[in-house]
Amino acid sequence: MTDPEAEPPKPTPDAPDPAETHDPAPEIGPGRTPGADPEPETEVDLEAGPDPEVESIPDPEAEPAADAGLQPEPVAPSVADAADGPPPIWMRRPWQIAAAAAAVVLALMAWLIWSLPLGRALEPLSDSSLILVASDGRPIASRGSYKEAPVEVAKLPKYVPGAFIAIEDRRFYSHLGIDPKAILRALNANAKAGGVSEGGSTITQQLAKNAFLSSDRTLRRKAQEALIALYLEARLSKDEILSRYLSSVYFGQGAFGLRSAARQYFDKTPETLTIGEAAMLAGMVKAPSRLAPTENFAGAKARMRVVLGAMVDTKVITQAQARQAIRTIRVDVGRKKLPTGSYFADWVIPQAKEAIEASYGETVVKTTLDSNLQAQAEKILARALDRDGKVLNASQGALVAMRTDGRVVAMVGGRDYKVSQFNRADAARQPGSAFKLFVYLAALREGWTPTSPILDAPVEVSGWRPKNHEVKYAGRMVPLITAFAGSSNVAAVRLAKEIGRDKIVRTARDLGVTEPIPNDLTLALGTGPMSLVQLTAAYAAIDAGEAPVIAHGLANWRKPPGVHKLSKKELAGMRDLLRSATQRGTGIEAAIPGAFGKTGTTQDYRDALFVGYVGDLVVGVWVGNDNNASMNGVVGGGLPAKIWKEFASYAVARSAPRAALVEAPPVETEDLAIPELPVDGALPEGAEAPTAESPPGVPAPPTAPAAEVAPAAPAPATDVPKT
């Protein structure tokens, strides 16, 4: 590194002073050729510095070198030395500039030849049209763009391609992909209009844009469009270009290509279009959405008149044929217009796209949706919210119904899909006490039974004091089945401490829960958000006797590996617990023969749920507000349980003639015979709590009560469910 304080080196006798070599190279005057020897000049500009092409003249006052054989001391390269390199491109000979430009063009053309997929305009769209149908075959929704197989110009009546050429590009067969006259005409028209009123793109340029580029109106895109157009003209015949254009141009309402448009608006093939129909379709290209004849027939017909006039001017048709076309034109819709979405459709579309490949036309996808149950679910939920929502301050609701194998037969994600497409059935909300399913199932796996005692009294855990709903406690030891039926929060927290958080999480994962679960004992009260779909699927596992149950919406869905049977003991115990909640617990409003379920209510009445099953139908219901506002005392055993009961009763009545419903799928062990227990947890006077090992009336063996030691858990969440 050079020392900045060091004395600069002295110039040697044979080298010019570095300070004198910083002047730029002399400018090239008129008549002077870059790189040529300079002509002698009559005047010398002494201020211009040394000419880089003239040998430097030594300073006569400088001392000669002591030894002629010694080389002068080296000096750093100067700016003058750098001027010996090639001159800038604008200072080179014209043929050099032309050669460089040609090389760039050739390189771009070579890149296009190797990378441009010429057949892209003929390929099916990546988001091809899907028609979702219910399990009975009724169409329920359509999604994606509609594109049929390509057309061939040679097989079409002459007036069909003639209509598009007449209105879009009259000089199509004579230009080379770019039409300078059309561009100048468009510029003049736009200047007079004070805006963009006319385009100058040829059909070849439109094909380039539709098949390979975006629709951005930028100079860069227009340059790319022109370059690709020239390339297409060099590689394809005019008829091939026109065929690709007609096969890919957009005609509105999701229809791409002439074959799709002919079916969409006239229920015909392109080969059978009339003159008027061809003119109307050609006229749509200018503004497909605005000029769709199914939406704006008057506007489409007015535009058709313009196209017919252009066809007469270009001698494609006669004036008489044009008049006849105007008199006979009519629309005959070939594709029934379906809703583009619904809560269920939005939910199942990703599953459908993964299961199919891009193809022409429409792909019909059969789903698991039951049209009748779906209609009834929408009606029941809307009616309940209309009736009670205002006074209860409950503005939204959701319902999901599935079979025990996970087939979703109904899904309502909100009060009105047209108003809000947000799917609350698939959104994460706190489940409240409905999460206790996992806590009690984990306890059963650890050897607890529905009659094992647990203390229902106030408890403190690391400064957190959970409370029962309405601050009611039994104040004594109660069986698990009583604590579950009454949805005791303090008992659930004690139970969670006794068996440990990890075992509860493991049980939830085993039943298919994938959402994050809190890292403290508040998980026992459902403080970790999860979707109603996933929660309902977990309850379906108890009904099915195997886990996990995967909620799905495709009829051809196949069960993945890893599904395993639940043990007979845990199934029998869990079913007794779920039945107790609907028969004499917090879910009694949902009581119908064969009903099993559990309520859930979160802090400050922000969420209220009821999830349960009857026969092979598993249903989850949620009510609340999108802004997380508190409801007026709504609990899971209130409005949600009533909605659940009404929907489940309809489903049971509808399916009763086909199959008799039982309370639960049969297991090879008898359900426990549990005496009636009051909700407050007190046993009947003089009665002993039976166990799975001893029948009623036989004294139960002593069972160690749950410890009341406060668990060493992280600080709990502040938002804790009430029930």
Image (spheres, grey):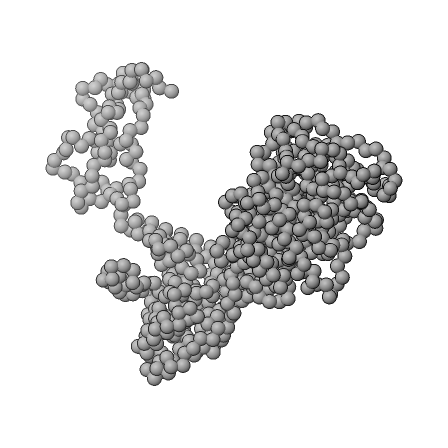
- Outermost residue, left side: 42
The image position of residue 477, as x and y in percent, is 75, 34
Considering the image in quadrants, where does the N terminus appear? top left
Q: Nearer the viewer, residue 148 or 339?
A: 339
Decide if residue 251 is on the left or right side of residue 190.
Answer: right
Considering the image in quadrants, where does the C terminus appear? top right
The image position of residue 463, as x and y in percent, is 62, 27
Q: Nearer the viewer, residue 317 or 379?
A: 379
Number of numbered discs visible in the structure rendering:
0
Residue 233 is drawn in which quadrant?
bottom left
- Outermost residue, bottom side: 320
Q: Which residue corresponds to the image point at 59% horizontal and 62% vertical from the top-left?
A: 375
Q: Which residue corresponds to the image point at 55% horizontal and 66% vertical from the top-left?
A: 362
- Outermost residue, right side: 698
Residue 331 is drawn in which quadrant?
bottom left
Q: Which residue corresponds to the image point at 40% horizontal and 81% vertical from the top-left?
A: 328
| Position above or below: 210 against 20 | below
The image position of residue 90, as x and y in percent, is 27, 45
Q: Which residue corresponds to the image point at 51% horizontal and 61% vertical from the top-left?
A: 340
- Outermost residue, front side: 685
| Position above or below: 56 against 480 | above
The image position of residue 161, as x and y in percent, is 40, 73
Decide if residue 361 is on the left or right side of residue 196.
Answer: right
Q: Is residue 551 visible?
A: no
| Position above or below: 519 against 110 | above
Q: Is residue 647 visible?
A: yes
| Position above or below: 88 against 1 | below
